[in-house]
Image (spheres, helix red, strand yellow):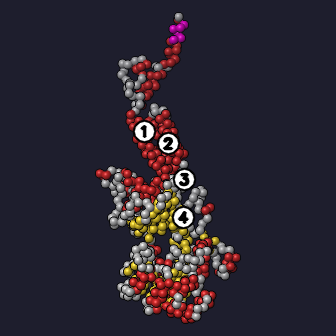
Amino acid sequence: MHCIQQNRTRTTSNSRGPEGSLGVRSWQIALAAGLIPAVPALAAGPLAELPSPGNFISPIRVLLILVAMIPWLLFCQWLDKDLSRLRKMNQEMWNGIVLGGGIAGLAIWIFLPWQTAGLFAAGFGLWFVVTVGVCGTYVLIRNSQVDAPNRVFTPRHIKAWFASLGSKKKESGPSLAFERVKLTGADKKKVPVPQDPNQTASYEAAQNLLFDALWRRATEVEMLIGANGLRVAYRVDGVVTPRNDVMPREVAEQAAAFLKRIAGLDPEEKRKPQQGQIFGTIPGASRGETKIEVLSSGTTQHERLALKIIGDENRLRIADLGLTQAQREAFDSLLTAPGGLILVSGPKASGVTTTLYAALRCHDAFMENLLTLEQQPLMELENITQYRYDSTKHEGSYARQLQTVLRREPDVVMVSDCLDRETAHLAVTAARGGKRIYMGVQAKDSFDALKRVLSLAGDTDGVAEALRGILSQRLLRKLCVACRIAYKPDPQLLKKANLPIDKIEHFYRTPRPEECVDEKGNPKICPNCQGSGYFGRTGIFEIMTVNDAVREQIKAGQPVNSIRAAARKAGMLYLQEIGMQKVIEGTTSVNEMLRVIRDEEAKPGQ
């Protein structure tokens, strides 16, 4: 019995140590650190060493955790919505990564020991690094796969978001959309940012589409919305580029309905043709207010929405068209000559109307009576009376409408198309009578245009006397000066083109895909041309001046080869030769020049 008592005494003594109980000593340290509340001094025993009820968890720290979780939860909500619009990103995978990463960081934070404030702060730091790292990785990868205007959390995106918050009315509550393109509807009133959450989605969809199209310098946007799919295409610098990944079908329907509504069209009508217009401006851009024609039509299977963006290229003057110095002098002499007929020819969408407009701007609209007859005017011309021919609204023919225009005693008349025999005969007769007539002709070159007018007019002598000159043209894309690459041309190519090998140091071309990456191998998109390699367009022209030798050939009914020989003797250059000059100057590439020439050679009937 005595031994047992000694063992108990020894055990108790060992557990307490020289300072007393180990538990009490630890409790005193924690109490001194302020991590647990103090207990009454008279309390004794094991229960007295425990914190009082309600003090196991710090309410302040729980509140801090909940506050820190709010931005992450909001990001997860935005993430799911953003992934639904991006087809390049795996929605399920990224939702799982971001959600799982945040939960893992939260678990690390919560289950770390909380005995000291330093460990609590370390837990927050670990959670912050894990969560922000996962979210930031998504943003970086997402932005690398979309174009600049669609990137998020950039300085531009954040600035626009704050600007949109500042423009909202307090009583209307916050809106989820912000204005990227200032819109003016068909009623000439500014389109406000909607405050109704039910209208935000359609407004944002239209804003994204218009901003993307204007940023890419598109002149046409076509949306074909079917029951099972969507097809979107932009025309940029005359080339059609598919843009099917710009938005899903449901979003496209919302954008189409919104654009139709502000353009004055019936959003519910999806089959009958409708036409309206709006105006758009990107804040801070050098490009001013842009007119956008909205055209809607469809069938039982799909709805078609087309946007025609009227840019500044339709306001060009002769000096801006791309004529060489020699051609500019030759064309100026044609423009200053009194009366006569000048033909401007080319295939469809080759810039013929723009050149005709530029020719009209060489005349004083206050001193001369300038009239036009057009099937589809590109724009309104100041101080020039424009007549539009619509076969669905006019009982008479195009030629009858021209006859009406000629009765207005004009000094200068622009005829956009030579459609039939009567039109050609009226134009030739008016030009012989002293009026200046500019007429557009669809033809592959100057000689093809001459053959067409001779055939339609049926008056060889009249055409020879009235005709002053023929201009034929094409539009080709200009290389982007920010990313074009110089290279040494193939000597065989130079020899075949009759170019001096020793005098041409280099040509320019667009960068290849493998050259459009940075040092780390990430895709790099040129901010000037958006990765197309081209920026803007210029014209290449051939001008045939009808001098006495050419006129005699025409009167004599000589074949085209004889007329061509006479024109070449007078110094006329062909389209291919002018195109090659643009290549040598570095304005365009060989591939682009060949594309334009070959495309039209394959379509001689246009």
Numbered label attached to residue 88: 3
Examine the rendered structure and indicate whether residue 263 appears above or below residue 174: below
Report the amino acid beneath label 4: Thr
- Report the magenta residues as a range: 3-8
On the image, the x and y values in percent for residue 334 come to 49, 88
Q: Can residue 6 be found in the magenta stretch?
A: yes
Per the rendering, the mark at residue 241 is: 4
Disc on res. 99 = 2
Residue sticking out furthest to the front: 395
Q: Is residue 285 visible?
A: no
Instruction: Give the Cα distance between marks 4 and 2.
Output: 37 Å
Mark 2 in CB contact with mark 1 (< 8 angstroms): no
Q: Is residue 192 left or right of residue 218?
A: left
Dot 1 corresponds to which residue?
65
Kindly identify the amino acid type of the residue bearing the numbered disc 1. Ile
Nearer-N-terminus badge (3/1): 1
> Could you give the CA–CA distance between mark 2 and mark 1, rounded to whole angstroms?
16 Å
How packed is label 1: few (under 14 Cα within 10 Å), some, or many (20 or more)?
some
